[in-house]
Image: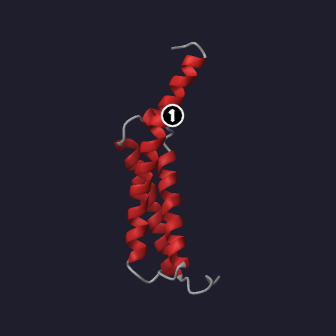
Amino acid sequence: MAVSAGLGWYSLSGALLTELFGATAGAIIHFAMPHRDTRGPALAPIVGAVIAGGVWLLFTWMGMGDTGWIWLAGLGAPIVLTWIIVAVLSPLRLAHDRRERVRHGLA
């Protein structure tokens, strides 16, 4: 089965490698950041893998599949964006839980 329009096995294996890296980076970020009890253990790895795959897809569509930029963005974006997303979601969850405890009279 041929891969379409200039996307060879090299590009496909690169996409899989960056997604694996994104998931691994997300797992490390999950355990490195505080308040991990406010999020599921799969959230950060899934976010990292999706971001890595999305960046790889975007750079491939832009015709930058043969440059080093695709690797830099594919490996860097999951780290930065997953960290930002987890850093934003954890305090939001804590604030929501606090409001819900007050609303139910548990606080």
Q: Quadrant of the N terminus?
A: bottom right
> What secondary structure is marked by label 1?
helix
Residue drawn at the location 44% of the way across and 55% of the way down: 81
Q: Residue furthest left?
A: 32
Q: Position of residue 18 (x, y in %)?
A: 45, 66
Residue with the mark numbered 1:
93
The image quadrant that residue 3 belongs to is bottom right
Image: 34 above or below 9: above
Is residue 5 toward the left or the right of residue 40 in the image?
Answer: right
Which amino acid is tagged 1? Arg
Residue 2 in picture, x, y percent from top left? 63, 84
Horizontal and vertical percent for residue 16? 50, 68
Between residues 5 and 17, which one lies in front from this camera angle?
5
Question: As rendered, which of 40 and 105 lies closer to the eye?
Answer: 105
Q: Residue at x 34, y 43 (%)?
A: 32
Q: Position of residue 22 (x, y in %)?
A: 44, 59
- The crowding category of the residue bearing disc 1, from other C-alpha atoms within 10 Å (few below 14, some 14 to 19, many at least 20), is some
Q: Is residue 12 above or below residue 54?
A: below
From this view, report whether residue 91 is shown above or below residue 97. below
